Image (cartoon, rainbow, N blue to C red):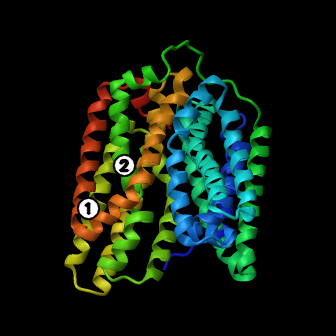
Amino acid sequence: MVRFNPARGVATLIAMVTSPTRVLGARPFLVGMFVDALGSGLYMPLTLLFIHQVTGLPLTTVGLGMTVAALVGLAANPAAGILIDRFDARRVLMGTYVVRALGFAAYPIVDGFGPLIGVAAAIAVGDRAYYPASGSYISDLAEGPARDRLYTLMATARNVAFGLGGLLSAGAVALADSAGFVLIALVNAVSFVVATGCLILSGRQAPTSPPVRHSGGYRQVLADRPFLRLVAAEQAYTLIHLILPVAMPIYAVTVLGASPVLLGILYTSNTVLAAAGQLPVRRWQRHARRTHAMALSGTVMMAACAAFAAAPLLPHGSARIAALVAATLILTLGELLHTTPSWALAAGTAPPTLRGRYLAIYQQTWAIAAVFAPAGFSALLSVEPTMLWLILAFLVALAALTVLRLSRHLPTEAVAAPGA
């Protein structure tokens, strides 16, 4: 059994903050990122139950409200891209923290469907806008190998914090019962305030690349065919990332007959390995072309899909459980191989003055997947489970081939090995 080690998580954070990044403003930014993710980790494992307990609204009402909020969040990425390019990524990132702080502080006073929609939609907008803003801010802070390292450290900080937050949420609910959910809401609001303060301390940074005037806005982004092909490939990778939180729990329990207890162990294992593996994987990838690194991650993800599909062919009991564990570990490796090259490739492809719009379109893949994956995955699992894994394997194989072919069409500085 793999358990999350809080002491190791804190030690990882200290190592990140004290490591010689040589990037001005990076350390307070990473600390803020950690605090933000720590607060989010408090409620994410309990999202629907958390909102139900805090507001007192029926679960069906909460579920409908969250669906509507997710649809509203689809518009946040494009809007965030415009704001990032017009102002700067740091201001937009601070705005996402402030909006979510106010939203979580307001959850305890929500008493109806209308207020729930308002609060949940505001939080969804903040969540969706956060990703292009944080990616753009890292691109402003650093370039080349330093940028890749910051993307890796950001992913590490968030995974460590999510794991710690999950442990703390269980403790808060166990000690304070229903009041623990209100405590989680308030602590999460405070975490966003602290993250905002860290961004203020980081200071405003000038972009690493000299400004070049670009006109056309999203018209120019949508006219960039190689980039749009990269976005299409990323959509497949994004769907693979949603296997663990969306598809695997249903598949494990209803098809493989696994105990729900195992799901928590697998989720924790994924979180621990994602936190511990980011830096070693980044060092291993540092001489590889980013497109080739992404293609390799797609190959590993195909193997994970094959392992999930093969599990029902084994005898009931320990053999199926072992196959499920193996598939989850392979999937985790694929995710690790994908994260940093994906971010760095998208940021390197974007012209500096349109980077906000480029990354907003790139991150829209997550918003689209969050809306359609739950229903799509559930439908396939209820009709023919094997079809889900075959479709996902086909899509990620096509994505891997696409990024390999894009090596000749994307900017050299985006594709090239980041160096040591």
Residue name at image x 58 percent, y 21 percent: 209
Disc 2 residue type (three-letter): Tyr
Residue 334 appears anywhere in the view: no
Question: In the image, residue 176 lies at what x, y percent?
Answer: 75, 80
For disc 2, the marked residue is: 237
- Dot 2, how many residues are within 10 Å of its Cα: few (below 14), some (14-19), or many (20+)? many
Mark 1 / mark 2, whichever is N-terminal? 2
Q: Tell me the residue at 33%/83% (across/down).
A: 257
Above or below for 382 versus 91: below
Residue lying at the far bottom of the rendered structure: 317
Q: Amino acid at mark 1?
A: Trp
Nearer the observer, 331 or 74: 74
Where residue 114 appears, as percent x and y from the top left, is 63, 56
Q: Is residue 123 among what the camera can see?
A: yes
Taking 39 as reference, is 269 left or right?
left
| Nearer to me, 291 or 420 | 291
Left/right placement of residue 181 relative to residue 243 reads right
Q: Secondary structure at mark 1?
A: helix
Q: Looking at the rendered structure, which numbered label has been put on residue 389? A: 1
Report the side of 283 relative to 159 (left or right).
Answer: left
From what the image shows, is residue 170 above or below residue 365? below
Disc 1 to disc 2, C-alpha distance: 13 Å
